[in-house]
Amino acid sequence: MENNACKVYEDEIQLLEEEIKLLAEKYDDLKQESTFYSDEEILTSIKLFQKEFQGESKGECPSDLKAQLESLEREMSFLMKFTGIHFTSHSKKTLEKNENRTVQKHRLSGNCHSLPFQLEFQLLETQNKENVSAVITDFNIRMESEEYSDLSKFVSSTEKHRNLLLFFRSLSSYAEWYEHRRCTFLHFKAKYPDIVALPEGQLGDYMILRNPKLPGFELMIVWKIHIDEEGRTTPVLDLLTKVPEQVLERKMAPFENAPTCFRSMLLLFGIETAIENLIKVAGLEKSIPALLTRGSNFKSSFN
């Protein structure tokens, strides 16, 4: 009992130490940022804020400000639903500030549908008598892209060109297809549990179709999501077959030309209908004569 109590206290102490460390870092950031502003600038900002809050600058009352805030919240909610992008945290740190230029470091975290992301970039603002310009520098993206070669290449290209708008626009499209694939796989797995298998789970990029009464017979539906360096997203589906060798030799199975037929169905009926039609055909025992299921040698388009 004493050991357990000590362990609980040690865990609480560790959590408190971590929280103190985070607060100290925030304090240092605020302290550093405040050094870029003079006392006069700080007082001016406070007075301006007080005037706006009291409605003296534009004659607005608190109810008007509340209505504006509610309107902005509705617009933000709509954009989040439309794009699937949800920001969970944001931090800003001023690295440099003078009369002509300001350098700030931003950190953003969030999710696009089920894909988490983290961004870190510096924003350089310069101004002269005529205009103000802003440029993104040192752009870094952190997300689980190692498993998806196309996404990894796109992330590297976006970091190189420092295109923040392209990243969010393309990530939204990619994540939407990613979520659609996941939901489609789960739907067919639930509807045809004896035929559909997901070896890599719901986040995998392929599904296996098996007929329980036809050992050795498999169809693999591969669903890749291609995204090029310019952010264009395209779903790419194909069919791979694993059929008993005797079936291929006698040409008695309707699956010999299955990949070509599947691609044609995709063009004619769309993804969901094409997959469901294939599942229904794969589940028919009479599609491949039972007498041919006793062989042990197979020809396969995949291993």
Image: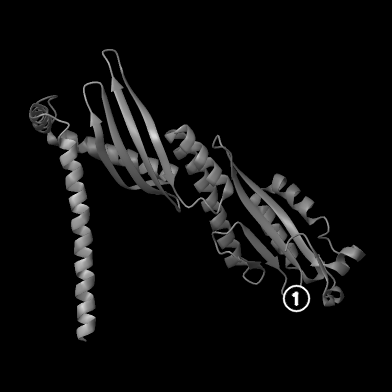
Crowding near the residue tagged with mark 1, few <14, some 14–19, many ≥20 C-alpha atoms within 10 Å: few
Say if residue 122 shows up in the picture.
Answer: yes
Given residues 96 and 292, the one toward you in this image is 96
Q: In this view, does 129 lie above or below 138?
A: above
Q: Which residue corresponds to the image point at 76% horizontal and 61% vertical from the top-left? A: 241
Residue 35: x, y in percent?
A: 15, 34
Q: In which quarter of the image is the N terminus?
A: bottom left
Q: In this view, does 200 lie to the left or right of 10?
A: right
Residue at image coords 33%, 40% = 76
Amino acid identity at mark 1:
Lys
Question: Residue drawn 22% across and 64% down?
Answer: 15
Residue to which mark 1 is pinned: 213
| Residue 272 at least partly seen | no
The residue closer to the viewer here, 287 or 32, is 32
Task: Establish if 167 lies above or below 114.
Answer: above
Provide residue 209's location: percent of width, then percent of height: 69, 65
Residue at image position (72%, 62%) is: 219
